[in-house]
Image (tube, grey):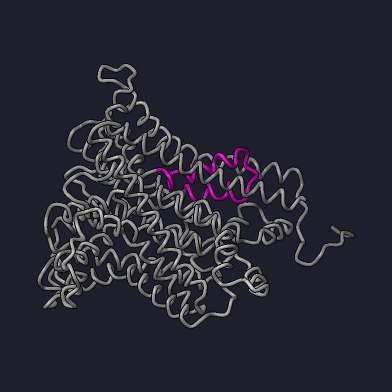
Amino acid sequence: MMHLPPTRAGHLARALSATAILLFLAMPIVIILVTSFGADGIGTFPPKEYSTHWYEQMAAPGGNWATSIALSSLIAALTTVFSLILGATAATALARGRLPLHTAVYGLVLAPLLIPQVVIALGLFLFFEPAGLLGSPLAIALGHTVLAAPIAILIMISTLKAIDERLEDAAASMGASRMTIARRITFPLATPGLIAAAVFSFITSFDEFFIAQFMSTPDTRTLPVLVFNALQFDVDPTVTAVSAVLIALAILALALVTLVRKLSGHRSQQGGVLPVEPLT
Amino acid sequence: MAGTALAPGKVRVKKTSAMRGHRSRLALVNAVPVTVFLLVLFVYPIIGVLSLSLKGDSGGFTLHWYADALSGVNLSVLLSTLRISAETAVLSLLVGFVLAHAIARMRPVFAALAMLIVVVPHFISALVRTYGWIIMLGEHGLINSLATSVHAPGAPYSLLYNETGVVIGTTSVMLPYTVLVLQGVMRGVDGRLLAAAAGFGASRLTIFRRIYLPLVAPGIGTAGLLSFILCLGYYITPALMGGDKQTVVAALIDQQVMKQDQWNSAAAFGVILLLLTFAGLGVLGLAKLRRTKAHARRSSS
């Protein structure tokens, strides 16, 4: 109902309801951040005393938390490498080339984002279990790539589509080889997209719970699996500090992507940070 | 290229057939890695789930696992999953509509800020957000201490470890999707249509009901179905905020694999989830097809 002159009551009602809903979205995050500095442990808000005790406990070398943070980082780094390779090639095929079976390949790429993750996780469990690969960081990273690569591909397709192909054509008409064009023109222009794809792949893997849960063993538990267990079974207040670090990581990643896009002069639309808007 | 008059901004190097051939070869080669990867680690494992769900204890074909999944306690878990998903879809649609509508009328600065608050949580682990809700909704959590301090009737409320808690949590997870989809449709509404109706003397309610709502209806359908589908296999929030009883199918699958070694039964549940998802996607696809056809008919006549 844009463009109709607002009534005062309608304006007030809209402002109030929007504020309430935005609070609904933001409150759980604010609460975690504040609680993580509370001295009195789980579940009391606001805390009566403040301390950094849980952060010290989380970082304690050799502890469960430090070990799983290292494991999750390794898996996320591997996932990022795999999805960038798959993303760059697939996006080149889908955005630039005349690909026979274009729709089929595109559908295959989108499917992992829509199929229930529990089904994917179960399938991967059945796939890796007989080979004795449960708990292998490489196998978990391959599993995470099933979810991360589609996101990387979607980001890179939109990046490639935004590059003016006439620049490449012009270079070609002046005698540049395909390698030179890729290296000197396409790659520099696509760098912001590559960085965004890398960041989102890393976060997707670092936060992923279901596949890691099905493919982990008691010795190899990723951070989300450990957090889930802590929330379900124990009452280890360290989990508040871990959660706060995960929040900080997500916000940092988003800030990085936004900054890179700003610096490269990319004009993003509203909500353009969200790479996945399926079926619209 | 001499002698060819080209409009400025439309200069293109004419592509030779050799270049075109190169392009399709290039595309084929580049499509190979992702296709092979997804066929091996996505399609093949899901076929594995399907075949396991049809395999009897001694190896032959059986529908036993489906019969088992669709009876007794298992059926009630399936039904409560569908109920929770439907409740979440309706709630996040209502809340999402109000918010998207408000954002559409905000000044650009506030609209951008609001969209940031919608999008940022989406990138924060659902585990962490669920934990935030657990702290907030507990017996001594923020909501209940507020309600008690103002002497609200019936306080403290039990908001955790029951379906109310689960639906609050899942709604907050699905809300970014509905807001984004609805935002997209609302931005596309031509304001002149509304102004024209107002010019003919239509009341606000009539304009909303007869013009605005039909125009954004496709977005409402997409957003609702999308959150329903995404909810079907969702696990984290129901597992942590639900009661002692198993409440959703995904939790049941996890339990059957991890604790009971009932892989066949887990596979049957997986296939049922898959079929429900396909049904939802099918409805979405059909609706889109019908709109495209209607649009084509309108613009050709």
Q: Is residue B29 magenta?
A: no
**Among the 4 quarters of the image, the one containing residue A237:** bottom left
Relative to B73, residue A153 above or below: below
Q: Is residue A30 left or right of residue B218?
A: left
Camera-nearest residue between A227 and B190: B190
Q: Kindly identify the residue that appears in the image at 48 percent across and 43 percent down.
A: B281
Q: Quadrant of residue A199?
A: bottom left
Task: Left or right? Give the position of B298 relative to A52.
Answer: right
Instruction: Give the x, y percent position of residue B287.
Output: 56, 46
Furthest-left residue in view? A40
Q: Is residue A144 above or below residue B192?
A: above
Q: Nearer the viewer, residue B232 or B261?
A: B232
Residue A63 shows up from this direction = yes
Toward the bottom, the furthest residue is: A8
Looking at the rendered image, the quarter that the N terminus of chain A falls into is bottom right
Q: Residue at x 20, y 75 (%)?
A: B146
Of all residues, the one furthest to the right in this rendering is B3
Tell me which residue sits at (60%, 57%) in the image.
A161
Give the overall secondary structure of the magenta segment: helix
Q: Residue A186's spot in the image, x, y percent?
A: 59, 59
User: In the image, B21: left or right of B119?
Assistant: right
Above or below, B240 against A265 in this view is: above
The residue segment tinted magenta is: A86-115
- A260, A247: nearer the viewer: A247
Query: Is B252 displayed left or right of B191 in the figure?
Result: left
Can residue A188 be seen here? The reply is no
Disc tally is 0
x then y, percent, for residue B279: 46, 39
In front of the other: B224 or A266: B224
